[in-house]
Amino acid sequence: MSLPTPCAATSRPSKATSCIQGPETKSLRAFNFSRASSNMDRPGFSFCICPDSRLLKDHISGLVNATETGGTCFERQVFWGDEALPPVFWEHLTLQGLFGSPRALVVRNAHNLPADVWKRLSTALARPNPLSWPFFCLEVPFERGQPKIPAHIAKLRCLDFAERKGWVWRSPGLDERGIRRFLQQRATDAGARFAPGALDAIAAAMPADATAAATELDKLLLAAGLDATLGPELAKLVSHEPDLDIFAFIKALQGGNAQAVWRQVQRDKLGGDSMVFPFIGMLLRETRQLWQLLSGEPVRLPPSVLPVKQQLAQQLGYSGLTRMLDLTLEAERGIKTGERSPEQSLDALVAGLFTVFARPVPRHTRRM
């Protein structure tokens, strides 16, 4: 038994008028992707390539808000590429009606969708729905200034067409220049200003994560008081710990080090709604990777890491990995349905993970 893995990437069609190749797409051979932009004053679909979830959200909100004119209001729906796209997504993507309301269909972690799903998406995108604006978020890291897009996505005709139409937005996240722009814009929006030398000092102390940087800036704005002038001395108030190492987190669970685990959770403020979903996503990806290793599937890992993860996968076995998946998906469901707060779901998830590793959770380490 193994988890589904991406199918082999399809080759690029030789004709510009063809979306994808194969006998099942003969009806599309005469279809021109340019129809995706006809009769619309907005992109037919958008690709957003950035590893920072906050920057993605802000960019998409800016595009949608700028389009909401003349009484037009988009209903925003979010889907996740870590799981199968539900039937309602495909209905909103393809079905048209006279009285439907426009929708912004945001697919987070779209880079995790397998090749066969992208093939189906490419077919659907060749017939644009004027009531739907799909946003595909490829939350991949950048290397040497370029995003590391999976091969089966990079070869898609729809991505090539979007590039030529200017429907692709790329950002490596908050680099040295980006953090300055980010802070300047947020300070201006808040009616504050930077004193001479303050922007450089504060930017140098900020984390390279938009959510964390926004939180730190809000703290500095409070410290600035009614004057709303940010001085360079406020840089010393910036406090930020490195991002959570999900594998180190799992190793702490494996070793039964409850204090280290809870300290890690509290340090990264994972109880907040903005952080718990990235944590769940990381845990799902780590569990999926361990499953692939246990199944003997090829996984690209550094030589120093591969044997350690293989050993962990063997120790957990299919039953342990299945339980990890169940706990993680249950935490996600509890938040999305409103049954639990993000903090409650996270506490239950971590406590459940301790049982997977057969280690009791000491009561004095539990949060109240």
Image (spheres, helix red, strand yellow):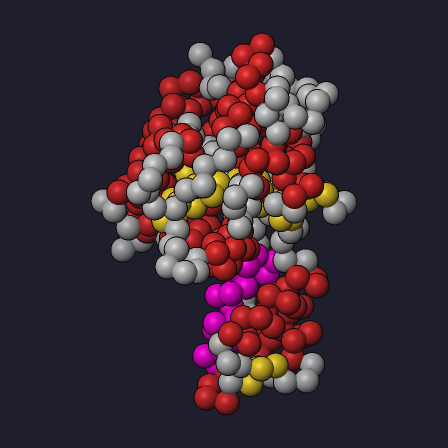
- The magenta stretch spans which residues? 207-223
Extreme residue in the top direction: 23
- Residue at figure coordinates x 42%, y 18% from the top left: 318
State the image quarter where residue 140 is shown. top right
- Residue at figure coordinates x 42%, y 27% from the top left: 84
Q: Residue 199 at what x, y percent from top left? A: 65, 76
Q: Decide if residue 292 is on the left or right side of residue 142.
A: left
Q: Is residue 218 visible?
A: yes
Depth check: give the residue in front, 233 or 160: 160
Extreme residue in the left direction: 339
Q: Residue 235 at what x, y percent from top left? A: 60, 75
Magenta residues, dominant SS class? helix
Q: In which quarter of the image is the C terminus?
A: bottom left
Extreme residue in the bottom direction: 227
Depth check: give the residue in front, 188 or 135: 135
Q: Quadrant of the N terminus?
A: top left
State the image quarter where residue 21 is shown. top right
User: Where is 182 relative to 231, above or below?
Assistant: above
User: Where is 9 relative to 67, above or below?
Assistant: above
State the image quarter where residue 185 is shown. bottom right
Q: Does the magenta stretch include residue 85?
A: no
- Residue at figure coordinates x 57%, y 41% from the top left: 37
Q: Residue 168 at what x, y percent from top left? A: 63, 45
Q: Decide if residue 270 is on the left or right side of residue 241.
A: left
